[in-house]
Amino acid sequence: MNIEDANFSENSFWQIVELSFSDFQAAVLLLSQKSISFMLEFEEFLAQKLYDLDQKVFAQKLYENISADDFLYVRCFVLSQGKFFYEKVLSQEMPMLSQTFEPLLSLTEKAYFLKTNNEFPTFRTAFSYETGSNKMCWQ
């Protein structure tokens, strides 16, 4: 089976992100077998999903216990639990848990290095995933 895939898809994104929580190295390997353009789109999609969760309404429920950096890692955890969980949290049908999964932020970088033996290039996504970046949702 040829895993190389030049065409990014949301399903592929969720497959890799979910795998990263249970077997991070397998997720790195799977992503490393994709094209460079796929990896860049993966990173862009990851940033957008993290940005979408960057909301004051979620942070206020967690901030008594966690820092701004940890809020980013909590958002990573939400993504690592899959599309269903992500959508339920985003729609506020399920609470955001104060569990973290920081390794998700290095997934593309590690996969790129495995594929190319080079550092992941400086890459600015359209959305920043840093806490407080989603200004409209922090007013």
Image (cartoon, rainbow, N blue to C red):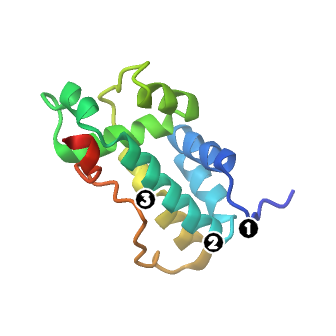
Q: State if disc 2 and disc 1 touch (CB < 8 Å).
A: yes
Quadrant for the N terminus, please: bottom right
Q: Is mark 3 on a helix, strand or loop?
A: helix
As drawn, 36 above or below 4: below
Q: Is mark 1 on a helix, strand or loop?
A: loop
Which badge, 2 or 3, is on the more N-terminal residue?
Answer: 2
Amino acid type of disc 2?
Answer: Ser
Which label belongs to residue 106?
3
The residue positioned 41% from the left and 50% from the top of the image is 103
The residue positioned 39% from the left and 59% from the top of the image is 127
Q: Is mark 2 on a helix, strand or loop?
A: helix
Which badge, 1 or 2, is on the more N-terminal residue?
Answer: 1
x and y, in percent, of residue 56 in the image: 23, 36
The residue positioned 21% from the left and 42% from the top of the image is 138
Amino acid type of disc 3?
Answer: Ser
Q: Distance between the residues labelled 2 and 3?
A: 17 Å
Q: Check disc 1 and report the residue beneath it.
A: 6
Eye-nearest disc, 1 or 3: 1
Quadrant assignment, res 17: top right
Give the residue furthest to the left. 64
Q: Is residue 103 left or right of residue 55?
A: right
Amino acid type of disc 1?
Answer: Ala
Which label belongs to residue 37?
2
Eye-nearest disc, 2 or 3: 2
x and y, in percent, of residue 31 in the image: 62, 59
x and y, in percent, of residue 25 in the image: 56, 52
Give the crowd class for mark 1: few <14, some 14-19, many >=20 residues within 10 Å: few
Q: How far apart are marks 1 and 2 (CA)?
A: 7 Å
